[in-house]
């Protein structure tokens, strides 16, 4: 027994020495970096898979320090965070007075995601280190993840890094810490209370604080009464119910550290004070979505939020997930502009009581989709055998908008206040001549709008409009039907939201952003910039007829971003990392396997169109370097024939130049280029292991389709001949991950996973950056094959995916032959459509001078003069 005791003490002593040395190393590194640098901390070998911060990815950072536990990235420039969209705990924070980082006043943003942290869950309670035990909380923000900003000293930051590397740092078991970074806060966060006095008044009745020592944080103290309780109660009364998981652990500690009766008396006093201030405090415009208590609720909420974001003005409203616990415990009622219930037909009694109180007592607005609470507001009658749960239902909201969606088993007859039938059981839509419950109580409604006498209002719906039902389809037919009606579904949902008084005006067009120059190899960067600099004027501007590029060393030099002027940040170390938030750079480089294409990237988060980026450098690019311009969003995307191309986030949108000698195989058949690019998109995905059965197809001449029903993207090519060289600019857009309002590749992947019936071995979703890189890699291989083997070999690949082989087409000819029929036999030697007429004659038709409705098997050929 004695040797075991001695060895235990020896082991503990070694660990203490190691920790002391480790902390000293961390402190020395931080002292050399702060306050000017942004240090991004990631778990290294002790974590189960390193995760990248959403807000500060380390893609262009330098690793300043690394050991067996953590890795510190130096982003070189202190990252500024605008706090105007954040919520502050008190009104004391003033960025213009005290938000300057020093070694005693460091601001740190801690980013988490909403998932159970299994490692923290297994950690002994005595070893856990809570973030709030190491600093003073400043503000928080919740979007797809939860961020909290704290202010701390250097020693606390060192302990935070050490605890993070040891997997002992936590906020809550339901919030997994992804990483953190030092920041420079700017702007003023929104306080919960209108003034400092009101905040102090609320907490003036708090019990005396109780000091508790956190052993895991080396003696750091946290005042359970004055700090943690204050934060917890304040956050529970704020506009963000999704923070409640973060708060629960603190409230439990508070209950344990004070007498129960005293705690409840204090809570009642504080709530009474809050109620007294309600009339003075502004009501945050929140939309809360409740999806039941089962494990599917988060998944359903994600789909509902996606649809709501397409309908309401998200510059005005914040959409939150109201969990089951928050529904019952959080004071969400006063801060809610709309409560939406989805996919919870069997609500618990206490939930029904909460919802009824919100509508009747607080005059709230409720939008309910087939829930058991609806019997409180209208007669809910089973539709009988005529309806089935999965039945598709079609109705019209007006002459131009026909919606197909799923419907429930019931219908409604209004019995509270004045009720209006929006969609009757018969299927016709709202016409403006509403039947009311007082005039026709037998009116059977699938969507019913009821205005209550005391001001509340309710819309009840048996039609699934709040989420994309195609995500639950398991067969291609219903998937296509629902997806095709998705835009009409969103229009119907938007109409209902407008009836409830919600702001459904479009969001403001996003501000244009500068461009970042990205490479993996420094010599490529130098070679590219050398070729560009030869064309710059005295102001370092590369000018073309309608578009100019301004090359700058860093973001601090930017003076203008406009539709015609794009600043390009050239320094690898000084690029503002915020400009890369929409680009998964690591995924791009991981999927890129080229020697020429895409090795230089010009990425911009928001641009009018990438098609103009290379206008001024098309004829002067160095040999063997073909850069690619990639956009996170386009505000004026361009399609074939001058069509506008909708380019929201989630689309792979990119443009790149190519050049060919006229006597080359491609130079002789340049019209094949659009076919090679569209084939590269489809072939690049379908040759990935597991993706070969995805029904991605090619529609002649340049479109990418799901089956023959829905368009996913397209290609546009412009070419210019100068001397003996053809210079081409290729633009491509394909929807990878944006499910609303139309279809995306990830929708098809999810359908394939559902149809397989497997719970493991599912093929993963794709990112726009990965698809772009995969397309460029495949295209480079196809171009090499084309040069070596000609168009015949390429057509073998093309025909695997195209939609038109062997189909009969109607030829509407403005010639002596008039109307006729033919059979599509393939592409001719120049890439044009080859059609065989009944007489045996084969004719070629090409995009110029012809109109095509290939999905209707029609080619309209104009007379050539």
Image: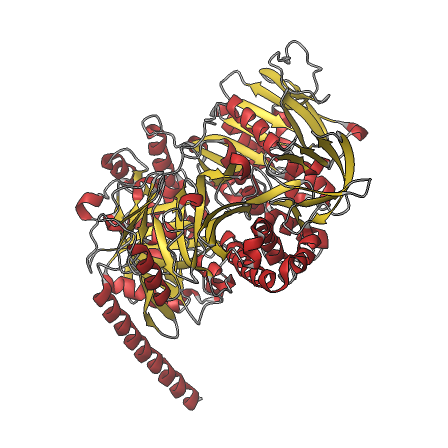
Position above or below: 111 against 334: below
Q: Going 63% across and 13% down the picture, which residue do you hit?
A: 436
Judge by depth and name the residue closer to the eye, 786 or 344: 786
The answer to whether residue 216 shows anywhere in this view is: no
The answer to whether residue 589 shows anywhere in this view is: yes
Q: Position of residue 859 (x, y in %)?
A: 69, 35
Position above or below: 344 against 375: below
* Residue 732 relative to residue 265: left or right: right
Q: Which residue lies furthest to the left in this view?
A: 97
Picture quadrant where residue 279 is located: top left
Judge by depth and name the residue closer to the eye, 836 or 805: 836
Q: Going 69% across and 32% down the picture, which residue do you hit?
A: 407
Number of numbered markers: 0
Position above or below: 122 against 15: above
Q: Which residue lies furthest to the front in this view?
A: 865
Q: Going 61% across and 26% down the picture, which residue do you hit?
A: 460
Q: Where is residue 645 in the image (x, y as percent from the top left)?
A: 51, 38
Q: In which quarter of the image is the C terminus?
A: top right
Q: Going 68% across and 14% down the picture, which residue do you hit?
A: 441
Q: Where is residue 223 in the image (x, y as percent from the top left)?
A: 29, 53
Q: Quadrant of the N terminus?
A: bottom left
* Residue 819 relative to residue 527: left or right: right
Picture quadrant where residue 201 is located: top left
* Residue 801 relative to residue 30: left or right: right
Q: Residue furthest bottom?
A: 3
Colour scheme used in the picture?
secondary structure
Q: Position of residue 373 (x, y in %)?
A: 61, 31
Judge by depth and name the residue closer to the eye, 645 or 278: 645
């Amino acid at each position: 027994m004695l040797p075991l005791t001695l060895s235990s003490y020896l082991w503990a002593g070694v660990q203490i020495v190691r920790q002391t040395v480790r902390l000293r190393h961390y402190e020395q590194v931080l002292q050399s970096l702060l306050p000017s640098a942004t240090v991004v901390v990631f778990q290294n070998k002790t974590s189960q898979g390193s995760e990248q911060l959403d807000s500060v990815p380390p893609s262009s950072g330098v690793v300043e320090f690394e050991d067996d536990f953590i890795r510190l990235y130096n982003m070189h420039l202190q990252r500024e965070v605008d706090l105007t969209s954040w919520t502050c705990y008190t009104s004391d924070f003033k960025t213009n007075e005290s938000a300057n980082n020093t070694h005693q006043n460091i601001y740190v943003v801690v980013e988490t995601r909403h998932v159970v942290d299994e490692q923290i869950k297994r950690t002994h309670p005595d070893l856990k280190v809570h973030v709030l035990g190491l600093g003073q909380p400043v503000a928080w923000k919740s979007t797809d993840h939860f961020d909290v900003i704290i202010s701390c000293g250097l020693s606390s930051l060192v302990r935070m890094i050490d605890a993070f590397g040891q997997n002992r740092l936590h906020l809550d078991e339901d919030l997994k810490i992804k990483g953190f970074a030092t920041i420079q806060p700017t702007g003023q966060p929104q306080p919960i209370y209108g003034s400092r006095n009101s905040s102090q008044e609320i907490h003036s009745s708090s019990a005396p604080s109780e000091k508790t020592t956190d052993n895991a944080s080396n003696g750091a103290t946290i005042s359970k009464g004055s700090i943690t309780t204050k934060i917890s109660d304040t956050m529970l009364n704020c506009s963000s119910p999704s923070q409640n998981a973060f708060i629960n652990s603190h409230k439990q500690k508070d209950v344990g550290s004070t007498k129960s009766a005293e705690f409840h008396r204090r809570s009642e006093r504080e709530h009474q004070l809050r109620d007294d201030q309600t009339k003075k405090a502004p009501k945050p415009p929140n939309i809360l979505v409740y999806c039941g208590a089962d494990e599917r609720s988060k998944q359903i909420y994600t789909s509902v939020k996606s649809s709501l974001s397409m309908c309401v003005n998200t510059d005005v409203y914040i959409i939150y997930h109201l969990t089951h616990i928050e529904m019952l415990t959080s004071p969400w009622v006063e801060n809610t502009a709309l409560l939406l219930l989805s996919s919870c037909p069997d609500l618990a009694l206490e939930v029904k009581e909460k919802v009824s109180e919100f509508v009747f007592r607080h005059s709230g607005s409720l939008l309910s989709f087939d829930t058991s609470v609806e019997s409180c507001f209208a007669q809910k009658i089973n539709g009988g055998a005529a309806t089935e749960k999965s039945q598709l239902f079609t109705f019209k909201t007006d002459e131009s908008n026909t919606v197909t969606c799923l419907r429930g088993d019931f219908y409604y007859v209004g019995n509270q206040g004045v009720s209006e039938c929006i969609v009757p059981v018969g299927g016709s839509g709202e016409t403006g001549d509403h039947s009311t419950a007082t005039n026709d109580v037998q009116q059977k409604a699938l969507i019913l709008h009821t205005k209550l006498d005391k001001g509340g209002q309710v819309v009840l719906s048996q039609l699934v409009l709040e989420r994309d039902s195609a995500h639950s389809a398991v067969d291609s037919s219903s998937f296509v039907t629902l997806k095709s009606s998705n835009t009409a579904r969103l229009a119907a949902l938007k109409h209902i939201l407008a009836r409830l008084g919600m702001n459904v005006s479009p969001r403001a067009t996003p501000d244009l952003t500068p461009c970042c120059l990205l490479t993996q190899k420094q010599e490529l960067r130098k070679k590219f910039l050398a070729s560009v600099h030869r064309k710059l004027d005295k102001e370092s501007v590369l000018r073309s007829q309608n578009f100019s590029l301004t090359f700058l060393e860093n973001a601090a030099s930017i003076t203008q971003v406009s539709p015609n002027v794009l600043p390009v940040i050239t320094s690898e170390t000084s690029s503002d990392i915020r400009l890369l938030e929409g680009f998964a750079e690591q995924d791009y480089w991981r999927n890129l396997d080229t020697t020429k294409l895409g090795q230089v990237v010009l990425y911009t988060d928001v641009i009018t169109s990438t098609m103009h980026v290379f206008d001024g450098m098309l004829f002067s690019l160095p040999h063997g370097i073909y850069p690619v311009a990639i956009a996170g969003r386009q505000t004026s995307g361009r399609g074939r024939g001058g069509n506008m191309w909708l380019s929201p986030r989630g689309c792979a949108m990119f443009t790149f130049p190519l050049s060919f000698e006229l006597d080359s195989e491609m130079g002789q058949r340049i019209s094949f280029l659009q076919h090679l690019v569209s084939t590269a998109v489809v072939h690049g995905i379908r040759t990935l292991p597991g993706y070969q059965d995805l029904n991605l197809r090619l529609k002649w001449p340049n479109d990418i389709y799901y089956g023959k029903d829905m368009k996913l993207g397209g290609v546009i090519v412009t070419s210019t001949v100068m001397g003996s060289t053809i210079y081409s600019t290729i633009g491509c857009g394909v929807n990878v991950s944006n499910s609303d309002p139309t279809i995306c590749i990830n929708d098809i992947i999810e359908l394939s996973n559902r149809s397989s019936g497997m719970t493991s071995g599912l093929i993963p979703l794709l990112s726009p950056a990965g698809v772009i890189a995969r397309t460029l890699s495949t295209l480079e291989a196809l171009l090499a094959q084309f040069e070596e083997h000609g168009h015949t070999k390429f057509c073998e690949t093309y025909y695997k995916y195209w939609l038109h082989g062997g189909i009969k087409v109607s030829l509407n000819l403005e010639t002596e032959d008039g109307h006729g029929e033919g059979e599509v036999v393939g592409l001719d030697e120049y890439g044009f459509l080859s059609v065989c007429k009944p007489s045996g004659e084969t004719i070629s038709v090409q995009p110029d001078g012809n109109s095509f409705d290939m999905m209707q098997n029609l080619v309209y050929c104009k007379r050539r003069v």
